[in-house]
């Protein structure tokens, strides 16, 4: 016996459209920087470059603090905090990606 | 307008730097508050930091030191005949700086410095909470 409520509801639900991969203007991973359709690897590389830049800045200030040429104490501590946060963010992104990959690999076929 | 990642750090850092410069100016004023000069020359001029906003709408936001304004060099004439710098009437010139006002400014600069560092701490906690979303 069909339940009228459910069948009425299911009639109104549009079929789920298949996921279409967005067309990538550039498939070359190194060429797509800052574009909408860039690959995950490019984004991660960009993020790592950003982290590297912040770490280099913090390291340079640590050297300045050691040699006595540091102008402001907070410049170093804030740069170090920023570098730490950027690293944590990159690690979080990587963990999420690995988690998603593992989830797909665990899928029963 | 694009703000950089962790933008509030840069803004708060600019605040800390500005208050650090204010602290420097106040400490300079207090250090020189008892400088006696001869009446023929100018007294030590008090330094005042002019804070200026960096336009948040078009740039990174934050605050900067727009310039240093100097007080009057006229100072106050004090009768001090034993001072080696005294003129023939026995007068010397002292800077006209009010220690009470400088101490009040010192407290404001110190608290402003600490407030901006508190912003850095809270921003760090907030960003960390955002990074922790969905973990565990």
Image: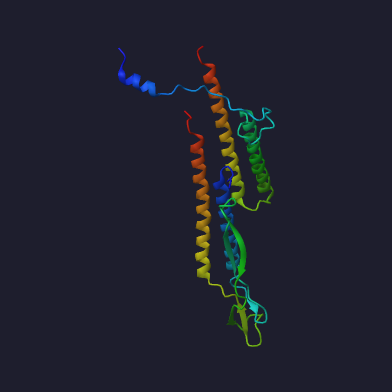
* Residue A95: quarter of image: top right
* Residue A37: quarter of image: top right
Q: Nearer the viewer, residue A86 or A60?
A: A86
Q: Is residue A99 above or below residue B40?
A: above
Is A62 placed left or right of B115 in the picture?
right
Is A75 placed left or right of A1 in the picture?
right
Q: Is residue B52 above or below residue B136?
A: below
Q: How many marks?
A: 0
Q: Is residue B8 above or below residue B50?
A: above
Q: Nearer the viewer, residue A55 or A108?
A: A108
Q: Residue A27 at x, y = what percent?
A: 67, 27
Is B82 placed left or right of B109 in the picture?
right
Residue at figure coordinates x 64%, y 39% from the top left: A55
Residue at figure coordinates x 67%, y 82% from the top left: B40
Q: Residue B53 at x, y = what percent?
A: 56, 58
Identify the image's colour scheme: rainbow, by chain, secondary structure or one colour.
Answer: rainbow
* Residue A35: quarter of image: top right
Q: Is residue B3 above or below residue A106?
A: below
Q: Residue A44 at x, y = what percent?
A: 62, 31
Q: Residue A71 at x, y = what percent?
A: 65, 53
């Amino acid at each position: 016996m069909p339940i009228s409520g459910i069948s009425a509801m299911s009639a109104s639900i549009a079929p789920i459209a298949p996921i279409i991969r967005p067309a990538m203007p550039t498939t070359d991973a190194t060429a797509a920087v800052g574009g909408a359709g860039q690959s995950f690897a490019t984004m991660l590389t960009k993020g790592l470059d950003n982290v590297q830049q912040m770490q280099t800045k913090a390291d340079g200030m640590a050297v300045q603090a050691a040699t006595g040429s540091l102008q402001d104490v907070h410049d170093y501590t804030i740069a170090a905090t920023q570098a730490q946060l950027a690293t944590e963010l990159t690690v979080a992104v990587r963990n999420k990606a690995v988690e998603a990959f593992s989830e797909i690999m665990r899928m029963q076929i | 307008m694009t703000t950089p990642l962790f933008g509030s750090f840069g803004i708060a850092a600019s605040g800390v730097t500005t208050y650090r410069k204010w602290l420097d100016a106040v400490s300079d004023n207090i250090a020189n508050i008892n400088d006696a000069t001869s009446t023929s020359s100018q007294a030590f001029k008090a330094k005042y930091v002019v804070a200026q906003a960096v336009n948040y709408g078009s740039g990174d936001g934050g605050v900067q030191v727009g310039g240093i304004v100097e007080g009057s060099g006229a100072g106050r004439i004090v009768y001090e005949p034993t001072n080696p710098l005294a003129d023939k009437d026995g007068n010397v010139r002292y800077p006209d700086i009010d220690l009470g006002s400088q101490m009040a400014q010192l407290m404001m600069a110190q608290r402003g410095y600490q407030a901006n560092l508190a912003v850095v701490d809270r921003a760090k906690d907030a960003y960390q909470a955002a990074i922790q979303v969905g973990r565990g």
